[in-house]
């Protein structure tokens, strides 16, 4: 008697994937998620906690039961009395309020060209710190980086005002784990504007709270320090530092604050948000179309190369987003250059074989879908079976039957438009024209075989149809 194989415990596997089976360093900043919602993505990592996995799961059940009795604000309709409860006010201030004030200030404060150049440089620094650092280095571990790179990305990533590495990395891993589901923090199925910015401006439903293991992130002291002091680092790098640079170099403190500070951060935010919205909305899906991510040059242009999102979701730990030489991906190029000077290493890539498998499978899927829309004739298995004598009798009753490859075809509607002329077909009626059709008179084209297949009416018993025939629907010669 053979032993039964042990099956994977799905609950335990999910516990491992969420990281709730581990004790890790406790890191708090005292100011919430900053750009996120603790209700939605807060991981339960706490080395000082005595809670077991069972305790955490029990807490989750109690929370679920709580909101089964009383609807969370996210499940309640918007009214004049509760609209303010739906809004995530911290994010509204950071993403809408401050940028609006900055835009209004431009009517009073002149933009100096030196400040504009500084703003562009800082825009590149903070934008690349998100794509090169927050995203590919920390969230996906697509490569490893030396300390100078990690410190640079932690500082200028904070200047983008998108939350700490810890929060951003956790939220993004949840997004990949639950793409296009209610647990996806920026679920693209809820519409362009929700995935772009709406998800941050409203309170999320806590019953969709999800976790992902980020213990590896917390093991990095740069991540811990940045998270613990995120608010101060963010305020200094995003607003104070640009003001000081522009003030000291060009005597333009206020211009630095507005243009190189507030507006630069706002533009970076909107560019990053395009990865959640635009990259799930426009473009092609060369690797998989089961989910919403798409590839498009425009999105790549806006996001420092993060626009080849269909590839990224299929091969998330690949340090590249663009795999073709002509595709725009400055982040990939920067990582590669850093590796050449010893500041980056262990660059991860998926095998070319795996990548081409995805391409071929998706192409085949499209071909199969196109095939289904076409008439390939009645399948042989669905055709009636006639004896030869039955064929002869029916041919006398209906003028237009001919046998080719053991299959009876009704060509009566095609005789008058046959490229070889009517006499040739009329001479074949009521007969077996297999040899003539297959090279005896004409070696017919693939199109001729396809057209002939749409005229099938029956199969001759014990004929060549059971041994050798062309099946256009399969695109092969069956033997």
Image (cartoon, rainbow, N blue to C red):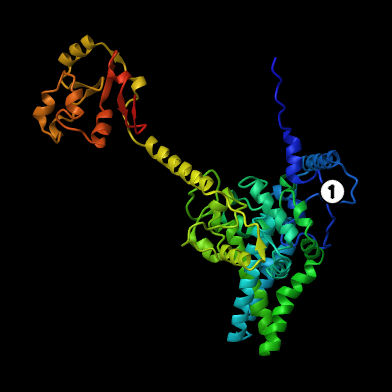
At which x and y percent is residue 182? 65, 45
At which x and y percent is residue 305? 55, 62
Q: Quadrant location of the C terminus?
A: top left
Of 194 and 164, which appears nearest the observer? 164
**Above or below, 430 relative to 223:** above
Q: Check disc 1 and report the residue beneath it.
A: 23
| Quadrant of the image occupied by residue 86 | bottom right
Of 85 and 187, which appears nearest the observer? 187
| Quadrant of the image occupied by residue 102 | bottom right
At which x and y percent is residue 117? 59, 81
Q: Residues within 10 Å of mark 1 (few under 14, many from 20)?
A: some
Q: Is residue 84 visible?
A: no
Q: State the residue lying farthest toward the left.
A: 423
Horizontally, residue 160 falls left or right of residue 471, namely: right
Residue at coordinates 52% horizontally, 58% vertically from top-left?
322
Q: Tag count in the figure?
A: 1
Q: Quadrant location of the N terminus?
A: top right
> What kind of element bears circle 1?
loop
Residue at coordinates 50% horizontally, 47% vertically from top-left?
287
Of 111 and 420, which appears nearest the observer? 420
Horizontally, residue 181 falls left or right of residue 59, namely: left
At which x and y percent is residue 389? 21, 9
Horizontally, residue 312 falls left or right of residue 400, namely: right
**Above or below, 300 relative to 103:** above
Horizontally, residue 231 falls left or right of residue 374, namely: right
């Amino acid at each position: 008697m053979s032993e039964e194989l042990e099956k994977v415990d799905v609950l335990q596997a999910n516990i491992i994937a969420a990281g709730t089976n581990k004790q890790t360093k406790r890191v708090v900043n005292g100011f919430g998620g900053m750009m996120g919602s603790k209700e939605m993505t807060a991981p339960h990592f706490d080395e000082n906690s005595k809670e077991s996995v069972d305790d955490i799961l029990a807490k989750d059940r109690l929370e679920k039961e709580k909101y089964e009795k009383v609807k969370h604000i996210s499940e309640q309709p918007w009214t004049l009395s509760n609209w303010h409860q739906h809004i995530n006010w911290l994010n509204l201030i950071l993403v809408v309020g401050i940028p609006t004030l900055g835009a209004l200030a431009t009517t009073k404060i002149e933009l100096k060209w030196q400040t504009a150049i500084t703003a562009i440089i800082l825009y590149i620094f903070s934008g690349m710190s998100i794509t090169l650092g927050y995203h590919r280095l920390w969230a996906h571990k697509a490569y490893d980086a030396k300390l100078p790179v990690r410190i640079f990305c932690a500082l200028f990533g904070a200047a983008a005002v998108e939350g700490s590495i810890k929060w951003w990395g956790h939220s993004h891993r949840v997004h990949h784990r639950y793409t296009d589901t209610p647990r996806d923090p920026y679920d693209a199925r809820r519409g362009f504007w929700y995935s772009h910015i709406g998800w941050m401006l409203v309170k999320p439903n806590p019953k969709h709270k999800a976790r992902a293991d980020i213990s590896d992130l917390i093991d990095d002291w740069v991540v811990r320090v940045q998270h613990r002091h995120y608010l101060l680092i963010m305020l200094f790098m995003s607003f104070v530092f640009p003001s000081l640079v522009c003030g000291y170099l060009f005597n333009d403190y206020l211009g630095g604050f507005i243009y190189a500070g507030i507006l630069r951060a706002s533009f970076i935010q909107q560019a990053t948000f395009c990865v959640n919205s635009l990259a799930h909305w426009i473009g092609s899906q060369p690797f998989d179309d089961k989910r919403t991510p798409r590839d498009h040059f425009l999105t790549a242009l806006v996001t420092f190369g993060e626009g080849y999102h269909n590839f990224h979701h299929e091969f998330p730990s690949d340090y590249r987003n663009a795999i073709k030489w002509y595709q725009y991906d400055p982040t990939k190029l920067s990582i590669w250059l850093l590796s050449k000077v010893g500041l980056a290493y262990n660059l991860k890539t998926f095998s070319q074989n795996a990548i081409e498998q995805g391409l071929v499978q998706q192409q085949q899927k499209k071909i199969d879908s196109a095939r289904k829309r076409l008439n390939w004739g009645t399948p042989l298995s669905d055709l009636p079976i006639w004896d030869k004598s039955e064929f002869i009798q029916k041919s006398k009753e209906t003028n237009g039957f001919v046998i080719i490859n053991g299959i009876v075809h009704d060509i009566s509607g095609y005789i008058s438009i046959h490229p070889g002329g009517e006499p040739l077909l009329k001479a074949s009626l009521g007969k077996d024209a297999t040899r003539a059709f297959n090279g005896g008179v004409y070696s017919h084209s693939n199109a001729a075989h396809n057209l002939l297949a749409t005229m099938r009416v029956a199969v001759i018993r014990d004929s060549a149809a059971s041994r050798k025939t062309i099946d256009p629907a399969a695109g092969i010669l069956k033997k």
